[in-house]
Image: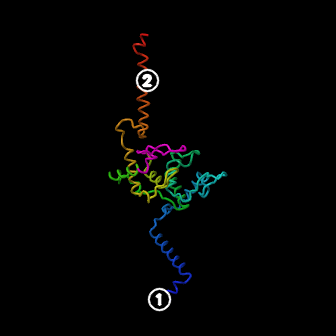
């Protein structure tokens, strides 16, 4: 006991204990932490083909090695793509937002410049540059497996986290500085999931710790359910809410009554007699 007590008082004892604690914590974390998404599932041919496409269509903005290009004024001409993952590339390229047609506050959705195979190859190459989010699988996008209660739960989550920008039915809305939340109509389940995972442009990132993959699937299922519903009341007004409906009533309804009143006043009996 005396010998052990003497060793505990050794000047290096505290350092050894701290080192052992760090090694233990690191080992436990390495065992239980989720793996970062990589390009393991992509073939070497996909990565090589993706690099060729990247050098032709993307390197002029993002740099030959995807590290980005800085401007002389200290800004960024094209951001670094190291670590953005395959999900970000599949979203940006698959929705036609990239390549960017012109500099603007926000990249609009348009017809894609690359087909599905080329988009996959570009995603594989960018994923090989550094770990990042992978393209989401069925646990995010299998909306057909969602039950009625799942869709109701997805609606609650959507109204709590998404309606401030995208409107209660995903019709989109205006944001400051010339930006906007795009409409979710006719957007694929994969692209919606990728947007939640990567947080493109002004959209926040909803990690799996914040919204689980199952909850993301339920949100997408709700969006698709609303998208398929008819306008039982007639003209939907774009689903933009009571402000648009009120404007429609005032401009068309009240405006029509005012015009009718003016016409009656101009063609009344007293006017004809005079």
Q: Which percent across, then down, holds residue 96?
A: 52, 47
Instruction: Work out which residue is located at the far top of the displayed protein and give it.
Output: 273
Residue extent of the magenta highlight: 160-185
Q: From the viewer's perspective, is the residue at label 1 or at label 2 nearer?
A: 1
Q: Which percent across, then down, holds residue 136?
A: 45, 57
- Residue topped by disc 1: 1
Q: Is residue 190 left or right of residue 77?
A: left
Q: Is residue 266 above or below residue 22?
A: above
231 or 74, which is in the foreground?
A: 74
166 or 3, which is in the foreground?
A: 3
Circle 2 packing at 10 Å, graded few (<14), some (14-19), many (20+), is: few
Q: Quadrant of residue 177?
A: top right
170 or 59, which is in the foreground?
A: 170
Q: Quadrant of residue 255?
A: top left
Q: Secondary structure at mark 1?
A: loop
Q: Which mark is residue 259?
A: 2
Instruction: Work out which residue is located at the far bottom of the displayed protein and give it.
Output: 2
Magenta-drawn stretch contains 237: no
Inspect this view and state whether residue 185 appears: no
């Amino acid at each position: 006991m005396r010998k052990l007590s003497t060793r505990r008082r050794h000047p290096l004892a505290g350092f050894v204990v701290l080192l052992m604690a760090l090694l233990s914590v690191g080992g436990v974390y390495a065992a239980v932490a989720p793996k970062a998404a990589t390009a393991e599932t992509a073939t070497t041919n996909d990565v090589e083909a993706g690099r060729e496409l990247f050098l032709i269509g993307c390197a002029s903005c993002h740099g030959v090695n995807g590290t980005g290009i800085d401007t002389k004024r200290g800004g960024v001409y094209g951001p670094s793509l190291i670590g953005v993952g395959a999900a970000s590339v599949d979203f940006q390229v698959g929705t036609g937002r990239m390549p960017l047609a012109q500099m603007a506050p926000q990249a609009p959705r348009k017809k894609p410049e690359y087909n599905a195979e080329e988009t996959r190859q570009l995603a594989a190459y960018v994923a090989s540059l550094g770990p990042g989010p992978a393209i989401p699988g069925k646990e995010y996008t299998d909306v057909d497996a969602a039950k009625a209660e799942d869709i109701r739960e997805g609606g609650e989550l959507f109204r709590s986290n998404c309606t401030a920008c995208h409107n209660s039915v995903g019709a989109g809305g205006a944001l400051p500085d010339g930006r906007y939340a795009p409409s979710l109509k006719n957007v694929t389940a994969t692209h919606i999931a990728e947007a939640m995972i990567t947080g493109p442009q002004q959209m926040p990132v909803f990690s799996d710790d914040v919204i689980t993959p199952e909850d993301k699937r339920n949100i997408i299922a709700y969006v698709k359910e609303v998208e398929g519903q008819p306008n039982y009341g007639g003209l939907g007004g774009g689903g933009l809410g009571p402000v648009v409906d009120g404007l429609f009533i005032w401009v068309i309804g009240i405006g029509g009554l005012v015009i009718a009143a003016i016409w009656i006043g101009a063609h009344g009996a007293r006017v004809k007699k005079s």
